[in-house]
């Protein structure tokens, strides 16, 4: 069972309280934050002062630790209003679609945003692979000189050779499938199947739909699954046997179990290709996908500019290596992602200073700077004046 923040075991990290903090500590500064569902968490906050979390909407889990060590992280369901002690590492993960909360801290705060050496795996996750429907499943026995002239359709097709040899041509490329080997045709791929004059072929065909894949998922999953022959693997072979066995039982929930088995087959295939080189798409298609991905990264930065964004977090969110991210920014805007983020934060700080709604300490916290001193130093380096001098100069220009 989950422990809650109201549990006695949370007392070494903080405690819950009952009255909203704004009513009892009006001098504290605060930042509105939104947490999302994540499977892996590597980035944790650590304030030098007392901090307070007040949830407005959603349900979440608070991850806490006394050290920057994944093994020491403890999970607590977020119950009531939460006070976190100084120098405690913490992160918030939403278990609903999103979780909105206010984070309060002292105006002279010092914040360390720490990337743990290894990621913490939070197990309450949304599925990444979603089978929408099994459209058909057949077992076929073909004699020598069988010839299927070919077709293309808008769904996936898995072909697994149980015995014999099967020739298949996919978009003009010839492949040979032998005992216990399989291949997956993707939506829109034209494919033929035939046997030569000396081989039979007994094989299973499964037609299925996956949910719509984004261009990024297509880069990672779609291109990993198609245009290749998967050789014998004991786990895959056992799953396929279980799929065939369940398809004949006729018992309740048989179809649901078949969907689960097919999902696991696809996941196992992806796991086996994760470290392998992917088939590279054509230059024009690849460039289009990369342009779309870069636009999404820029939009993500803009949407989360009020958080202490780090390069590892962006790489994790978009399943990119640090090198790939750096190269993408270099090729697109001839600028590093770190500099782009910092410039955007400083541009936003100018707008906030001119609005005259927040103190400099509040702007620093809202934009995710680790301290007001670091914010002022960064501002001075870019604009050659302090934030207060910037405000003063613009007030004079308006007169």
Image: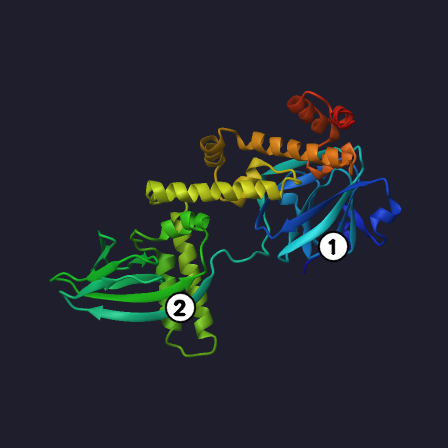
Q: Residue furthest left?
A: 197
Which is nearer the eye, 20 or 152? 152
Which is nearer the eye, 282 or 314? 282
Looking at the picture, does residue 26 appear above or below residue 163? above
Residue 365 lies, in percent from the top left, at: 73, 37
Q: Residue furthest top?
A: 384
> Looking at the rendered structure, which numbered label has been put on residue 259?
none
The answer to whether residue 288 is left or right of residue 338 is left
As helix, strand or loop, the secondary structure at mark 1 comes to strand
Total marks shown come to: 2
Q: Considering the image in quadrants, where does the C terminus appear?
A: top right
Q: Residue furthest front?
A: 399
Q: Quadrant of residue 395?
A: top right
Please indicate, yes or no, whether residue 47 appears anywhere in the rendered image. Answer: no
Residue 285 lies, in percent from the top left, at: 36, 45
Pointer 1 or 2: first along the chain = 1
Which is nearer the eye, 242 or 130? 130
Q: Considering the image in quadrants, where does the N terminus appear?
A: bottom right
Residue 42 lies, in percent from the top left, at: 60, 42
Looking at the picture, does residue 246 appear above or below residue 215? below
Q: Name which residue lies at 26% across and 66% down.
A: 203
- Label 1 crowding class (10 Å Cα cut-off): few <14, some 14-19, many 20+? few
Residue assigned mark 1 = 56
Residue assigned mark 2 = 134
Looking at the picture, does residue 63 appear above or below residue 179? above
């Amino acid at each position: 069972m989950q422990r809650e923040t109201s549990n006695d075991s949370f007392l070494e990290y903080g405690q819950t309280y009952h009255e909203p903090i704004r009513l009892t500590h009006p001098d504290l500064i605060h930042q509105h934050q939104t947490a999302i569902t994540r499977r892996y968490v590597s980035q944790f906050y650590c304030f030098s002062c007392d901090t307070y979390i007040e949830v407005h909407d959603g349900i979440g889990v608070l991850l806490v630790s006394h050290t920057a060590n994944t093994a020491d992280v403890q999970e607590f369901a977020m119950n009531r209003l939460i006070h976190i002690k100084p120098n405690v590492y913490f992160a918030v993960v939403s278990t609903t679609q999103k979780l909105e909360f206010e984070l309060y801290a002292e105006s002279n705060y010092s914040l360390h945003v720490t990337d743990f050496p290894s990621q913490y795996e939070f197990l309450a996750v949304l599925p990444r692979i979603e089978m929408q429907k099994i459209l058909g499943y057949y077992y076929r026995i073909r004699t020598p000189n069988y010839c299927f002239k070919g077709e293309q359709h808008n769904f996936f097709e898995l072909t697994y050779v149980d015995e014999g040899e099967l020739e298949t041509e996919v978009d003009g490329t010839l492949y040979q499938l032998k005992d216990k080997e399989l291949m997956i045709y993707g939506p829109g791929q034209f494919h033929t199947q035939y046997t030569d004059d000396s081989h039979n072929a007994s094989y299973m065909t499964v037609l299925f739909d996956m949910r719509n894949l984004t261009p990024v998922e297509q880069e990672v999953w779609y291109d990993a699954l198609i245009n290749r022959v998967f050789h014998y693997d004991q786990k895959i072979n056992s799953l396929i046997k279980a799929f065939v066995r369940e398809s004949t039982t006729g018992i309740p929930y048989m179809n649901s179990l078949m969907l689960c088995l097919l999902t696991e087959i696809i996941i196992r295939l992806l796991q086996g290709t994760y470290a392998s080189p992917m088939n590279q798409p054509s230059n024009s298609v690849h460039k289009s996908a990369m342009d779309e991905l870069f636009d999404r990264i820029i939009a993500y930065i803009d949407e989360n500019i009020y958080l202490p964004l780090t390069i590892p977090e962006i790489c994790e969110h978009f399943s990119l290596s640090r090198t790939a991210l750096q190269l993408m920014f270099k090729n697109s805007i001839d600028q590093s992602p770190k500099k782009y983020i910092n410039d955007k934060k400083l541009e936003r700080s100018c707008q906030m200073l001119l609005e005259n709604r927040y103190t400099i300490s509040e702007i620093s916290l809202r934009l995710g700077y680790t301290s007001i001193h670091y914010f002022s130093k960064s501002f001075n380096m870019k604009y050659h004046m302090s934030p207060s001098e910037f405000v003063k100069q613009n007030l004079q220009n308006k007169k």
